[in-house]
Image: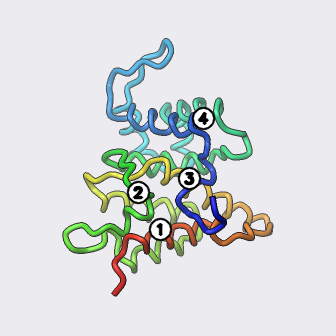
Amino acid sequence: MSRNDTSQALIFRDKAACQVLNDWFDSLQERGRYDSASRINGRVWRAQLRRAEFPHSIMVTDGYHHLAHQLNRTMQPKDLHPLALALFTAVVVHASKNNQDGSFAQQLGVKINDRECLSRLRFDRLLAARTPDELCSRLIRAIKLRGELGVNVVSLADGIFLWMQEWFARQENRELEANPFHRNSVRWASEYLLSTPQK
């Protein structure tokens, strides 16, 4: 992967972790899936997560705990921050389906009915989010605008986890990633512009 390639995940590189995300999202559509010996009602999880307040109410739901438990088996603890996972689960439950055609940011720039799914102004506001709460509400709005087209679940997770890494670094006055193409705002902007016709 070149230093300026934004097409590959930076956090969710492991295929097993990606499969966990995809399987967990798929389970949200079902009432009677079995995982090991336990029965899962994904529709109840989805309803609970949609009603829960970010972040603390999210973290006490069964759906959040199940996903955290599964990811703990495939990811390093340093990469699996509870707040990042809470933000992801709070947002992704508003997606209608897992659409793996392009990255999440590319999907926001795709035209729907002759207009970008997310206008440049709204996209700039998304990039300007300064707190996890702001990012959460703006991502939910963006995902709802995608409607039945859905979003790329793994790409969305990768962007959220990378954004949270950067947010924690700023809170602790640590240096950000030197390569700008490994920063979430640059990655999302590059990918969005790939799908947005230039005027």
Q: Please tell me whether residue 64 is drawn above or below residue 196 in the rendered image.
A: above
The 10 Å Cα crowd at callout 4, few under 14, some 14 to 19, many 20 or more, is: many
Given the current orientation, which residue lies at the most extreme front position?
2
Judging from the image, the colouring scheme is rainbow
Q: Position of residue 126 (x, y in %)?
A: 47, 70
Residue type beneath disc 3: Asp
| Label 2 element class | loop
What separation in Å lies between label 1 and label 3 (alpha carbons)? 14 Å
Given the current orientation, which residue lies at the most extreme left position?
113
| Label 3 element class | helix
| Label 4 element class | helix
What separation in Å lies between label 2 and label 3 (alpha carbons)? 13 Å
What separation in Å lies between label 4 and label 3 (alpha carbons)? 13 Å
Determine which residue is flagged by label 2. 102
> Which residue is depicted at the point 38% across and 38% down?
46
Q: Position of residue 3 (x, y in %)?
A: 66, 66
Instruction: Tell which circle, 1 or 2, labels the residue nearer the N-terminal end.
Output: 2
Determine which residue is flagged by label 1. 191
Instruction: Tell which circle, 1 or 3, labels the residue nearer the N-terminal end.
Output: 3
> Which residue is depicted at the point 70% across and 70% down?
179
Instruction: Tell which circle, 4 or 1, labels the residue nearer the N-terminal end.
Output: 4
| Label 1 element class | helix
> Which residue is depicted at the point 50% across and 39% down?
21
Q: Please tell me whether residue 129 is drawn above or below residue 37 in the rendered image.
A: below
Q: State how many labels appear.
A: 4
Q: Please tell me whether residue 48 is drawn above or below residue 11 in the rendered image.
A: above
Determine which residue is flagged by label 4. 71
> Which residue is depicted at the point 48% across and 54% down?
156
Label 1 close to label 2 by CB (< 8 Å): yes
